[in-house]
Amino acid sequence: MNQKRENILNLALETDEQERARTGDLNVGFQAATRSWELIVKYHGDLAGAAAEISETIGVEYLIAGYAILTVPENLVDAVSDLEQVEYVEKPKRYYYALETGVGNRGCFTPVTLGPPYLTGRGVLILVADSGIEWTRRDFQDSRGRTRIRYLWDQTLTPGEDRNPPEGFRVGVEFNADQIDEALQIENAQEQFAFLPSIDVSGHGTAVAGIAAGLNTAAEYIGAAPNAELLIVKLGVADALGFPRTTELMRAVAWGLRKAQELQMPLVINLSFGNSYGAHDGSSLLERFLDNAAEIGRTVICVGSGNEGASGGHVAGSVYSGGVPGRGVPQDVRVELAVANYEQNLRVQLWQNYTDEYRVYLIAPSGRRAELTAPVNGGKFTLNIEQTKILAYQGEPAPYAVAKELYLEFLPNGGTYIGSGIWTLLLEPVHVVTGQYYLYLADSATRNMGTYFYEPTPQVSLTIPSTAAKVITVGAYDTIYDAYADFSGRGYADRERTIGVVTAGLVKPDIVAPGVGVRAPDLYGGYTPVTGTSFATPVAAGAAALLMEWGIVRGNDPFLYGEKVKAYFRAGARPLRGEEGYPNARVGYGALCVAESIPT
């Protein structure tokens, strides 16, 4: 076990490639064609020089604040991890768009957009890092037909001749506004595509950008900040599923920060996706990277809380009889997990405080029992139980986090599917101080609807990176009922939480915004209602652009960015039907209300 690498990376490197490819997450970041890994590192000193001493084949992309992305041949990962300049290493994670399947006056926009001070987001940049954009749509042009997209970086395109990636990066092709305007003048569709071959296949990014900053008066469509300018990143495709990876997101954020500084404009970053892997405590490199990014320039980062609130993918509790850490009598805990038919793989994580020691048993649907913690004192082990193979990894606390992890990957053993039925995790306390435990399944997008914990804990079901402390975490509510949308990821109701950077007292989500049936531009020239925290987030991002226009661009408050925007959103939030006690784990401080968030 390498203590400078996260547990899931250690497990991936210790697992046969063919078996790794059968899992949901272990192979993410591995590039089979080049036999290399993309790695996220926290570093100090001359990283490129140190890497070059190992091999000239190692690629280095510097980001911000001591973070970098390395492309490393698999046989050199150990040598790179052992470099003195490398402090910690993580592998990429796959992220999932937070969707379940015009803004109007939702969020109290019209008092400040149709009346004084007539805010439109002018002079503010909004970065949408997503699936791309249908850049030909009228929604993303100004009144003279010129594009409002200042730059478009398509990470999926191959550089060549006059097409280059942004300076300092190794992937994709960057287009500027002049090139987009030139492409808009081409009438032949094939020639237009040949000139600027960036397309949004899923429509997710187009919808997000439209909600944040779209404007089409002919169609009576107006986004939250209709005169804001756009930075668009089409995130690289991780695999056939088309979901982005951590590394692609980090590249996008670093690029956006550089563009905002180059253009000398305030920046709002919109991130409408997440992942359930991790301690949900702010300690991963991505979460800490975003906290650093939020402190650079005049920046606000809005992240969706995810759609895991009602998915049954999380259980938390205490082995103490009273349910309160350190109080009562420790007792065994049984957590039942329903596994549906035709499940090809499944990921389960157990996070606990390092002060606590449990014996952990896995009980199959037949009743056969296997102990998970006895075979090794940290590291990888494998067991076969019925028709299922379990890859397990018992980790140690990382340099940046106090939590201890037990990672389980369920794979078919000789067949196509893992064993279905009721699986049980049994926790027997050996020596406990807090007695807490936190269990997470893989994201609902990757498992069947019939796979879930029987008695789930909806709290702390928000996805990473919405768990980063200095981002604005945005949940969703239903404007028809003026009530919380049950799919929306929930935050930190557990005031006794004892693990991680995000501990008791930090509020997540910060606010909720309209996220059910939000009207958005589609790929076919029309508008479609969309649902999910993916689409609540750009409502908040557009609102942040309005506040920054009022404060920074118009000179009313030159320091209206970062945590100050979050504070104003919280102060202006309004109550929702059925909610008691603010802030709470479902809606934070309440529903976004732009008109009440601007100081008078």
Image: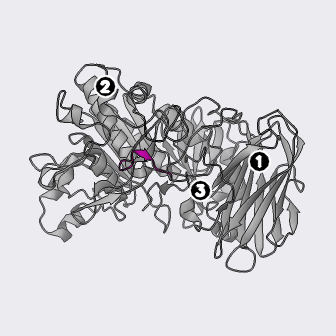
- Give the residue number, with chain letter if any, for mark 3: 37
Say few, some or many: other residues with alpha carbon within 10 Å of mark 3 (under 14 / 14 to 19 / 20 or more): many
Q: Quadrant of the C terminus?
A: top left
Q: Residue at x 74, y 67 (%)?
A: 422
Label 1 is placed on what type of residue? Answer: Gly
* 437 inside magenta stretch: no
Q: Nearer the viewer, residue 212 or 398?
A: 212
Cα gap from disc 2 to disc 3, whole angstroms? 46 Å
**Location of residue 279 in the rendering, given as x and y in whole percent from the top left corner:** 65, 44
Label located before the other in sequence (1 or 3): 3
Q: Nearer the viewer, mark 1 or mark 3?
A: 1
Tell me the element at label 2.
loop
Say few, some or many: other residues with alpha carbon within 10 Å of mark 1 (under 14 / 14 to 19 / 20 or more): many
Q: Nearer the viewer, mark 2 or mark 1?
A: 2
Report which quarter residue 328 is drawn in: top right
Q: Nearer the viewer, residue 543 or 345?
A: 543
Name the mark on residue 598: 2
Cα gap from disc 2 to disc 1, whole angstroms? 47 Å
Task: Residue at the far bottom: name it.
Answer: 415
Most frequent secondary structure within the magenta stretch: loop
Label located before the other in sequence (2 or 3): 3
* 484 inside magenta stretch: yes
- Give the residue number, with chain letter if any, for mark 1: 395
Label 3 is placed on what type of residue? Answer: Trp
Label 2 is placed on what type of residue? Answer: Ile
The magenta stretch spans which residues?
479-486
- Position of 474 with respect to 406 (left or right) is left
- Position of 270 with respect to 308 (left or right) is left
